[in-house]
Amino acid sequence: MTILKEKQLEDIRILQEESEMGDFTLKLNWETLRSRNGVLKNDFFHYDGRKLVGFLGLYEFGSKIEMCGMVHPDFRRQGIFTELKDEAIESARQREHKLIILNAPAQSPSGKAFLEQLPCTLAFSEYQMKWSQMELGEYDDVVIRPSRRKDEETEILLDINCFHFTEKEARDYYQRILHEDTLKTMMIESDGRAVGKIRVDHSGGEAWIYGFSILPEYQGRGLGRKVLKKLVAEQSQLGYDIFLEVEATNEHALKLYESCGFQTIQRQDYYQYEGLK
């Protein structure tokens, strides 16, 4: 069983704090860590006595699996992360995943150095951005409403068309996020039809924007800019600090977010592992 206990979660939190030291932020997907179901082994630990000094987590997304972890600065270069990585890779191999992605903050020298030793190539980068106060202008003609179960097929179609999910990945992801209590999906309407979605995750006193997508035939009309402005205005009025994530390969989206007052604070690099071939 791999349901994480409160003591383990606290150990991970302390290790993350000691590993980052304010220089970068590890993407450990805390919502997922807290909701592990115990079916598969996704979390790998290395203790020195009672102190956790190494951790690596696996996060499944359809036929892909992401890996992210850390070793305490005082315990690096001792082979700890290599052992954790090998154990995690074997677990992923047994599940017959077709694609393994390793994630490291762009500002982490130790993470970069470790990845240079592995058979992997940079696949894409993801920016974390934070909103700064600015005048947002007009957005009153935009309709955003909570997602309903009847929107399931539209949400799946959006993930397939806009994020290149396979149908199975999109359906699996839809089912998974139904059980994430802090995540809210909003549908974007045009001419009375649901044509897009945007997700907001409220945790730790912050609002994180994810999964912003509009059907291709409705793009290029200024709809996305108005939707973003309206959502940001609503979250700001509720008192949240507002953040979002966007892949760097999507330059149009990056410029859209910057024009609405978002500034880059972190970059996460994702590497495709080639060692399974």
Image (tube, rainbow, N blue to C red):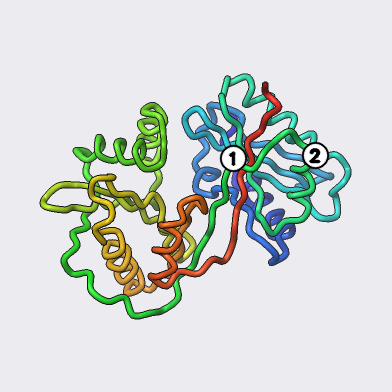
Quarter of the picture holding the N terminus: top right
Please give the label number shown on residue 4.
Answer: 1
The image shows residue 127 at horizontal and vertical percentages of 53, 57
**Disc 1 from disc 2: Cα separation:** 30 Å
Residue type, mark 1 in image: Leu
Please give the label number shown on residue 117.
Answer: 2
The answer to which quarter of the image holds residue 67 is top right
Residue type, mark 2 in image: Gln
Relative height, residue 271 to residue 136 (above, below): above
> Residue drawn at (29%, 40%), measured in percent from left and top?
155
Quarter of the picture holding the C terminus: top right
> Residue drawn at (33%, 71%), measured in percent from left and top?
238
Please give the label number shown on residue 254.
Answer: none
Secondary element under disc 2, as helix, strand or loop, is loop
Relative height, residue 171 to residue 210 (above, below): above
Secondary element under disc 1, as helix, strand or loop, is loop
